[in-house]
């Protein structure tokens, strides 16, 4: 609770200042606010008409809550109004303990879309993938529902089964049956890969820093000759900012981790690592299109500070800050409002563009074709009302990735991105690592992989054109 009160306290002070400013301006020149007051009066008139004239009785509280949701979600995909129940649920999630299926979701044009399944949960075991659409729960459509309402449909008593209807690109809709569990995901898993340690962080909940540090310490204690580390942030949907700074602090000896800038460009808040002994072995960070938010902060900081090489695919691009403001201590719910953008230590905006890896590697041959196909793109830039990147940059266009598994690589048994990350550690840098021979992909090959017939290669198409090199 303390975390949210601290956030709320900061937001309240900003709000109080804004209120005072509006009051002073209104006293001197009330005209600029006349339209606002008129529209609020209009809202009341519309509500009154609905209350008296609609064909069936209505619940005014629900109508007003939905109006507030509509107002906030029209701003960007991450702003929202949370009811008291939604707010309590959010607190449970950030503590890392709740009941459900283990899916991070968002809404795209009224359709619920999967950002990522959480490791070790029913959703992950059932094979639900980033980019899947969930269209129905137990046969009941959830099209047009808000994310919070869709979550309510999916959650229920632990041990009960729930059937999700999944729409996936190039496939007919299909049902997946899952059993609800108490979701207490361990955010960190670790093991040795030959001479190198491997640590996977699946989310930035309140335990992320503690568990990451403990896993690395355990590996080094058990394997004192460990030569380096692969830090896996693939399909990590993010979480708490303080945990992102805490995790980065394990690897960075002082200096900036991330900054955030709000409406006033001169108001910059910087978050720094502390000085002192840190994990100092060579490391590589794995990222992909599901690496988002707090995970992008860590990856961007380690890349900018030249602490780690990044291997994989361009990250999701969720580089905005949401402040949660409890209303009446949470009794009236809360406002989740986008208040700033994140920037890496070098000043790069993460928003919409994402973090580009130092060595671009597709995990599978099918994924390589998806990266080259506009129809398979799913990132922050996919949302029609996504906040723009402050520096005007755009996300890299669909293209043929620099590397993909050769036909001799067994994709069922091996992890090609991990294999290449270990190669980078072995050779000492991305530059020194021998590059894979690039296959000559064609649009026809991509079409064949996804069952598209009658496709032609058009001049200048992403697959026909030469592949750009990663930045």
Image (cartoon, rainbow, N blue to C red):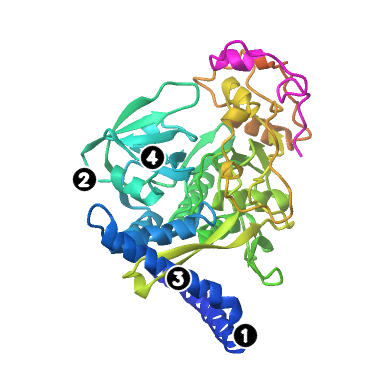
What kind of secondary structure does the magenta stretch mostly adopt? loop
How many badges with numbers are in the image?
Answer: 4
- Check if residue 455 falls in the magenta segment: yes
Q: Is residue 83 visible?
A: no
Residue 91 image-quadrant placement = bottom left
- Does 191 sit above or below residue 270? above
Q: Upstream in the sequence, badge 4 or badge 2?
A: 4
* Cα distance between the residues tagged 1 and 4: 45 Å
Q: Position of residue 409 (x, y in %)?
A: 59, 17
Q: Quadrant of the N terminus?
A: bottom left
Q: Measuring 30% from the left and 64% from the top, which residue is drawn there?
A: 61
**Closest to the observer: 299 or 469?**
469
Q: Upstream in the sequence, badge 4 or badge 3?
A: 3
- Check if residue 348 falls in the magenta segment: no
Residue 40: give its label: 3
Q: Are marks 3 and 2 in contact (CB under 8 Å)?
A: no
Of circles 1 and 4, the one toward us is: 1
Residue 143: give its label: 4
Q: Are marks 4 and 3 in contact (CB under 8 Å)?
A: no
**Extent of the magenta region:** 444-471
Q: Upstream in the sequence, badge 3 or badge 2?
A: 3
**Closest to the observer: 128 or 419?**
128
* Cα distance between the residues tagged 1 and 3: 19 Å
Residue underneath mark 1: 29
Helix, strand or loop status at disc 2: loop
Q: Position of residue 51 (x, y in %)?
A: 28, 62
Of circles 3 and 2, the one toward us is: 3
* Cα distance between the residues tagged 2 and 1: 56 Å
The crowd level at tag 3 (other Cα within 10 Å; few <14, some 14-19, many 20+) is: few
């Amino acid at each position: 609770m303390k975390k949210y009160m601290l956030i709320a306290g900061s937001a309240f002070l900003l709000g109080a200042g804004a209120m005072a400013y509006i009051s002073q301006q209104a006293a001197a020149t009330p005209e600029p606010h006349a339209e606002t007051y008129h529209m609020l009066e209009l809202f009341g008139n519309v509500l009154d008409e609905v209350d008296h004239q609609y064909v069936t009785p209505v619940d005014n509280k629900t109508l007003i809550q939905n109006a507030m949701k509509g107002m906030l979600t029209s701003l960007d995909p991450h702003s929202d109004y949370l009811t008291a129940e939604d707010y309590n649920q959010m607190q449970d999630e950030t503590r890392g303990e709740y009941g459900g299926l283990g899916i991070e979701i968002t809404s795209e044009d009224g359709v619920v879309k999967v950002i990522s399944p959480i490791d070790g949960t029913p959703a992950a075991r059932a094979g639900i993938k980033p980019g899947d659409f969930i269209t129905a729960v137990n046969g009941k459509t959830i099209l047009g529902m808000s994310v919070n309402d869709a979550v309510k449909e999916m959650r229920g008593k632990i041990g009960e089964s729930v059937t999700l209807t999944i729409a996936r690109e190039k496939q007919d809709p299909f049902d997946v049956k899952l059993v609800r569990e108490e979701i207490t995901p361990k955010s960190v898993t670790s093991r040795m890969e030959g001479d190198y340690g491997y640590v996977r962080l699946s989310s930035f909940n309140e335990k992320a820093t503690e568990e990451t540090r403990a896993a690395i310490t355990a590996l080094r204690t058990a394997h004192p000759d460990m030569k380096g580390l692969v830090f896996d942030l693939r399909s990590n949907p993010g979480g708490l900012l303080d945990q992102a700074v805490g995790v980065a602090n394990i690897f960075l000896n002082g200096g900036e981790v991330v900054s955030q800038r709000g409406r006033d460009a001169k108001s910059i808040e910087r978050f720094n690592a502390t000085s002192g002994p840190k994990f100092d072995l060579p490391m590589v960070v794995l990222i992909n299109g599901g690496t988002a938010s707090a995970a992008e902060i860590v990856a961007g900081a380690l890349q900018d500070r030249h602490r780690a090489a990044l291997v994989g695919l361009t990250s999701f691009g969720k580089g905005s800050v949401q402040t949660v403001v409890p209303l009446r201590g949470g009794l009236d719910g809360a406002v989740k409002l986008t208040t700033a953008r994140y920037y890496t230590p070098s000043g790069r905006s993460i928003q919409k563009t994402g973090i580009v890896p130092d060595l671009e590697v597709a995990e599978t041959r099918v994924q390589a074709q998806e990266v080259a196909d506009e129809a398979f793109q799913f990132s922050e830039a996919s949302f029609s009302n996504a906040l723009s990147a402050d520096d005007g940059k755009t996300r890299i266009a669909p293209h043929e990735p620099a590397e993909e598994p050769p036909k001799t690589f067994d994709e069922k048994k091996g992890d090609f991105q991990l294999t290449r990350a270990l190669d980078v550690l072995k050779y000492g840098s991305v530059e020194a690592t021998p590059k894979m021979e690039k296959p000559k992909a064609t649009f026809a090959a991509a079409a064949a992989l996804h069952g598209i017939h009658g496709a032609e290669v058009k001049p200048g198409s992403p697959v026909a054109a030469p592949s750009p090199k990663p930045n």
